[in-house]
């Protein structure tokens, strides 16, 4: 930073006048209102109030939030205000076939002859039987409910437990309402957990790895339809 720019910053800070918007000046203002000895590393809301008294620039709230969250002093010295993280809970043990199932998507595949680009994998946790349902990456919760009724409910009845990840299709209000109506308990796996539903999906998908590498990928989904219908 040149001496002339330092003088401009000092003048802006001392006179409490916003002359113009500049990323360098915004950073200096953030440092002065958060890292300074007089500031005392306030939280996001207090820092935002202090800056709002004299300055304003585009995306001010997001700039203050990102800066305060990236402060190493605050992250090392301040305690967390949220509730402590809970312990991992064991999934219920299934008592008969199709009593407890797991669902997950394999997405971003090459389009098949029917323009399918994803696979919905449904695994019975008791017998380890799996169902591969071709679908699309842009599937909605209503379409997921339709696939569930056609391929699972109509053939195996209503399961007691459904385990899935926290995808938008599974945590939507529509899918939760379906589970409540059919008296299905929904379990959602924790993020970044090794023993998650994605690991289970990969393990069931692995036997078809040979076909995936040695055949055109446009025919793989067609093979799944033949094997699992």
Image (cartoon, rainbow, N blue to C red):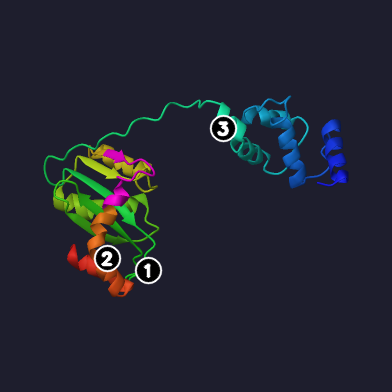
Q: Nearer the viewer, residue 216 or 80?
A: 80
Residue 75 marker: 3
Query: Where the C terminus falls, by quadrant?
Result: bottom left
Q: Residues within 10 Å of mark 2 (few under 14, many from 20)?
A: few
* Mark in front: 1 vs 3: 3
* Percent x, y of residue 48: 67, 32
Residue 89 marker: none
> Is 185 situated above or below 209?
above
Secondary structure under tag 1 reads loop
Q: Is residue 96 left or right of residue 70?
A: left
Mark 2 or mark 1: name the one nearer the start of the chain. Answer: 1
Q: Which residue is mark 2?
A: 209
Q: Is residue 11 left or right of residue 86?
A: right
Q: Which residue is mark 1?
A: 110
Q: Is residue 36 left or right of residue 123?
A: right
* Percent x, y of residue 117: 36, 64
Q: Quadrant of residue 20?
A: top right
Mark 1 or mark 3: name the one nearer the start of the chain. Answer: 3
Secondary structure under tag 2 reads helix
Check if mark 1's residue and mark 3's residue have beta carbons within 8 Å. Answer: no
- One can see residue 118 in this view: yes
Q: Quadrant of residue 109?
A: bottom left
The CA span between labels 1 and 3 is 43 Å
Q: Which residues are magenta?
A: 186-200
Magenta-span inclusion, residue 188: yes
Mark 2 or mark 3: name the one nearer the start of the chain. Answer: 3
* Percent x, y of residue 197: 29, 48
- One can see residue 145 in this view: no
């Amino acid at each position: 930073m040149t001496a002339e720019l330092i003088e401009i910053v000092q003048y802006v800070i001392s006179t409490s006048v916003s002359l113009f918007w500049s990323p360098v000046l915004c950073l200096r203002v953030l440092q002065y209102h958060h890292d300074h000895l007089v500031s005392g590393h306030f939280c996001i809301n207090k820092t935002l109030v202090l800056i709002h008294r004299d300055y304003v620039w585009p995306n001010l709230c997001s700039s203050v939030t990102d800066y305060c969250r990236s402060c190493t002093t605050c992250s090392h010295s301040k305690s967390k205000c949220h509730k402590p993280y809970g312990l991992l809970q064991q999934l219920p043990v299934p008592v008969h076939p199709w009593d407890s199932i797991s669902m997950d998507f394999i997405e971003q595949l090459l389009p098949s002859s029917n323009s399918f680009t994803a696979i919905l994998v449904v695994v019975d946790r008791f017998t380890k039987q799996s169902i591969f349902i071709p679908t699309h990456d842009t599937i909605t919760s209503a379409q997921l409910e339709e696939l569930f009724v056609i391929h699972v409910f109509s053939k195996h009845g209503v399961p007691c437990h459904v385990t899935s990840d926290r995808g938008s299709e599974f945590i939507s209000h529509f899918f939760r309402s379906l589970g409540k109506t059919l008296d299905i308990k929904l379990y959602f796996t924790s993020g970044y957990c090794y023993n998650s539903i994605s690991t289970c999906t990969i393990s069931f998908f692995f036997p078809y790895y040979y076909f995936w590498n040695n055949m055109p990928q446009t025919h793989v989904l067609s093979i799944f339809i033949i094997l699992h219908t």
